[in-house]
Structure formats: structure tokens, C-alpha cells
Image: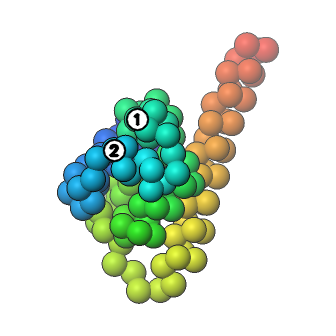
Amino acid sequence: MEELDRKAVGARIRTFNQRHIGIEERELAKEAKQSKTNLSLIINGHRAPNDEILTLLSQKYKANLDWIMFGKGPEINNHTEDPQMIANLHAKVVSLEMQLAEMKLILNQVLTKLG
């Protein structure tokens, strides 16, 4: 599993909005049912994106979550399968991977202090 670079993820979300959506961050936050502050924290790399923002980007705006999260593949997802089901599943998997990576970091910190 790859380490999540929150600053790069935030920069890709900002870039995707500028290139493909073209709305102000407060509007994007509103669409994702987020506070403007929370979205700002995500875009500036202080917080990992949550399921709501990932689902909005992938379902409504066809963002490729592999590109958003890891910079891999095209920015736009052109798959023709059931996009809502796949996007929800993919957003959940990405979210769980991020949570696991964070838990590993915390566990390593605890083990370092104990050892």
C-alpha cells in the first residue's frame, strides 16, 4: 500500500476543480456537505479527503480516484460500468486504506516509544 501524500492529494483536488468543475471552493464544499473549513484543510493537505468529497468527485464529476489519491491514470474516469456502485465502493476502499495507513503510523509511534 502506498503512503498517502495529503498535500499532493489536496493539490490534485484543487487542480481537478479548476480544470473540470470550475466552481468556488465554498460551492464544492456545499455540494459535498462539508464545511468550507474542512474542504480547505483537505485541499491544503492538513486532512485526508473523506468519503463524501471522494464520492462527489467520482460520481458527479467523473474524477478518477486513482489520480486524485495517487496521481495515477487519467484525471477523468471514462468507465461505462455502473458508475455509482463502483465509485461508492472505490471511495470506501480508498478511505479504508487511508485509515489503515494512519493506524499503522500511530502503532509504529507507540511501538517506538515502548521499545
Mark drawn on residue 25:
2
**Coordinates of residue 68 in the picture (x, y in percent):** 38, 54
Comparing 52 with 11, the one in front is 52
Residue at x-position 51% and y-position 62%: 55
Q: Is 3 situated left or right of 10 in this image?
A: right
Residue at x-position 39% and y-position 81%: 79
Question: Quick check: can you spot residue 66?
Answer: no
Q: Is 33 situated left or right of 20 in this image?
A: right
Q: Which amino acid does label 2 sit on?
A: Glu
**Coordinates of residue 114 in the picture (x, y in percent):** 79, 14
Instruction: Characterize the local packing of mark 2: few (<14), some (14-19) or many (20 or more) Cα atoms within 10 angstroms.
Output: some
Picture layout, residue 108 above or below residue 18: above
Mark drawn on residue 20:
none
Comparing 69 with 19, the one in front is 19
Comparing 37 with 47, the one in front is 37
Residue at x-position 67% and y-position 36%: 104
Asked if the residues shown at circle 1 and circle 2 are in contact, with their CB atoms under 8 angstroms apart, the answer is: yes
Q: Is 108 situated left or right of 53 in this image?
A: right
* Distance from the alpha carbon under mark 1 to that under mark 2: 8 Å
Quarter of the image for residue 76 reads bottom left
**Coordinates of residue 13 in the picture (x, y in percent):** 35, 49
Mark drawn on residue 40:
1
Residue at x-position 44% and y-position 56%: 31
**Coordinates of residue 77 in the picture (x, y in percent):** 36, 72
Picture layout, residue 72 above or below residue 35: below
